[in-house]
Amino acid sequence: MDLSEFQWQLDRPIRMKTAEFEREGRLKHCIFASQFDRPLLQKTCFIADMIRVLSRTREGSNKLRELLSHKRAMLYFAQPSTRTFLSFMAACQILGITCNEVRDPSLSSEVKKESPLDSIRMFSSYFDLIIMRSNITQFAECCAYLMNDLAQNSMRSVPIVNGGAGSNEHPTQALLDVYTIDRTFQFGQKEASSKSRIMDLRRKYSNLTHGLDNKIYAFCGDLGRGRTVRSLATVLSQYQNTTMVFVAPPDETLQLDSELRDHLISKNVQIYELDSLDAAINGVPILKQIDCLYMTRIQKEHDTPEMAASYQSLDLSHFKLTRDRVEQMKDYAPILHPFPRDSEEAEIPTEIDKDPRAMYFRQARNGMWARAALLLHICDGVDQLHTLYKEFYGVTAEESLVI
Ligand code: CP
């Protein structure tokens, strides 16, 4: 794909790009995880909670569907997806957005040599929003520039939402991951029935605090090719007193890359890079120290035959969970995984699924609420949601929300 017309825009550092992807204090396009600053994350998590609560009743669900019933979305997924595709579709349905999809470009006019950029522009003729996944790392970003150029020339232009770009970025996965971690680290603070959970936990873990600051996050598996790790680590680097432990096989392709490492160091994140889940820091096993474990699978679909041959000699058992390993973890430490997990390698065996710390199915469901919140934000529907909430419950969400 020839993206050379955007080269000078692509070559800039991200911090010089993000203002172009905003309008009127909101995101216009969602392309990079670093667009999610702390205030936006907090706001989006709150909106997700409001949507979650209203969805509990038929009347609330019906009202939510009126919020964006005048919008249409195109889901253009040129790479396989289960969760991102379906949770965006469900998010659209929650908000009343009508969806259509292209999941296989070989069934579109791209087989007649139509360029993917022309496809995108065509989608913008019919739809109000394009949610897309591509194996081309910078394609979503280029689509955002295309839309901005159209807007500057007073032509029709719609928001672009990146649902996974090559091995580089998966910003909405980071959003739902943070939403899941944030809910976990509230320790039931918002629940009337369990106010004292953190007090109980502090008897054993005296320094425990609410929220995402002051935490040790561990990432395990294919860290070099995992776009979810890159996006989540970038977002978490904004939090205070953050430590990250990266556990990856001893192969450069699978390990933390230097760009992300340098970024994290520049944000004062304390980093450790280890070669086994059984490794220790200062003599204490990491599994006993961490507050959150983010597992990933080895992404074999990116292997060349040479890579596959070289990985044969790696002992991947160091990067898999076992019951013994989970037993060492803190009582509250969530186990996350962006999924899919590898059913053959079993980096998380199914026997772990019943453990109360296994959050990965909830994490996937949270994707629906978090993505609905993001779409509402982009489509400028948040004020209407607040009005709806007040009409429905007679109090504001801020006054009443018990999640
Ligand atoms: N986590 C994630 O992106 O899953 P899918 O590839 O199934 O969308």
Image: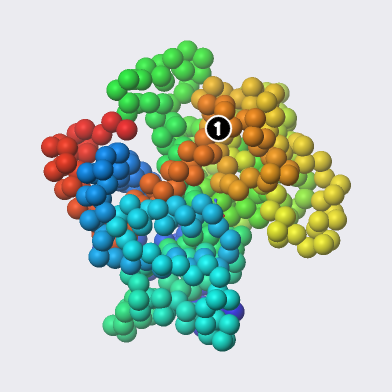
* Quadrant location of the C terminus in the rendered image: top left
Give coordinates of residue 56: x percent, y percent: 30, 39
Q: Would the CB of label 1 be found within 8 Å of ligand 1?
A: no
Give coordinates of residue 234: x percent, y percent: 51, 50
Q: Is residue 311 left or right of residue 322?
A: right
Q: In what element is the residue under mark 1?
A: loop
Q: Which residue is mark 1?
A: 358
* Residue 205, above or below 371: above
What residue is rendered at 46% in x and 17% in y?
A: 202
What residue is rendered at 51% in x and 18% in y?
A: 205
Residue 87 versus residue 328: which sits nearer the camera? 87
Residue 263 versus residue 278: which sits nearer the camera? 278
Q: Is residue 125 left or right of residue 134?
A: left
* Residue 16, above or below 223: below
* Residue 338, above or below 321: below
Residue 97 versus residue 238: which sits nearer the camera? 97
Give coordinates of residue 94: x percent, y percent: 33, 52
Question: Seen from this angle, which residue lies furthest front?
Answer: 58
What residue is rendered at 48% in x and 32% in y?
A: 214
Question: Seen from this angle, which residue lies furthest top?
Answer: 203
Q: How many callouts does the rendering have?
A: 1
* Quadrant location of the N terminus in the rendered image: bottom right
Q: Is residue 196 left or right of residue 335?
A: left
Give coordinates of residue 75: x percent, y percent: 45, 65
Residue 3 found in image quarter: bottom right
What residue is rendered at 32% in x and 28% in y?
A: 190
Res. 262 visible in picture = no
Coloring applied to the structure: rainbow
Badge 1: how crowded within 10 Å, few (<14), some, or many (20+)? some
Res. 304 visible in picture = yes
The type of residue carrying mark 1 is Ala
